[in-house]
Image: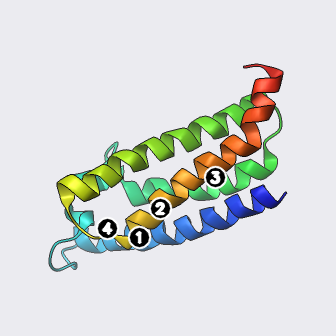
Amino acid sequence: MVVRGVITLLCGVALYASLFMLNKSRRAARGEVKGPSVVKTPRAHLFGVPNSLLGSLYYPGMAIAVWVARGRISELVILIAALGAAATSAYLAYSLIYVTRRECPYCWTAHIVNWSLLALCAYLFLPNILNRGV
C-alpha cells in the first residue's frame, strides 16, 4: 500500500513537470519561447509527438494502473512500461548531457521519477511475476 502511494506521488510530480514542459513546447511552436530551450531540439519529440505529451499520458496511467493491476499479465505490462520509460529517460539524459547540453530541471525531474518508478514497480511486482511464472 505504501509503495503504491509513493508511486502515485511520484507520478503526480512527474505529471506536473510534463504539463509544464508541454505548455512550453506549445509556446515554442508558436514562437513565444526566446533563446535556446530543450523543447526546440529534435530530441524533444519521440515518435513524432512531444515527449511531454507522452509523459502527460503515461504518468496518470501508471498512477492508476498500480492500484488496479491484478494478475501477472497486468503486472508484467506495468513493469515493461516502467522499463521502457526508464530506458527512454536514460537515452534522453545522455542526450541532455552530451548532445543538447542544456539545463532542464523539469527533464531531470521526470528522468529521476522514471528510474524510481522502475525500481518501485520491480519491487512491487517482480516477486509476484517470478513466483507465478511468466
Q: Residues within 10 Å of mark 2 (few under 14, many from 20)?
A: many
Q: In whole angstroms, how far apart are the C-alphas of marks 2 and 4?
A: 16 Å
The disc, 3 or 4, on the residue closer to the chain's N-terminal end is 4
Disc 4, SS: helix
Amino acid at the residue labelled 2: Ala
Q: Which residue is mark 3?
A: 61
Q: What residue did someone put label 1 on?
A: 106
- Tell me what residue is drawn at x 80 percent, y 47 percent: 68
Amino acid type, label 1: Tyr
Pointer 2 residue: 110
Report the quarter where the C terminus lies. top right
Q: Earlier in the sequence, mark 2 or mark 4?
A: 4
The N terminus: image quadrant:
bottom right
Asked if residue 4 can be seen in this view, the reply is yes
Separation of marks 3 and 1 at Cα, in angstroms: 20 Å
Res 60 → quadrant? bottom right
User: CA gap, disc 3 to disc 2?
Assistant: 15 Å
Q: In this figure, which residue is indicated by the disc labeled 4? A: 25
Q: Residue furthest left?
A: 35
Q: Nearer the viewer, residue 90 or 47?
A: 90
Q: Nearer the viewer, mark 3 or mark 1?
A: 1
In this figure, what is the number of numbered marks?
4
Is there a contact, CB below 8 Å, between mark 2 and mark 1? yes
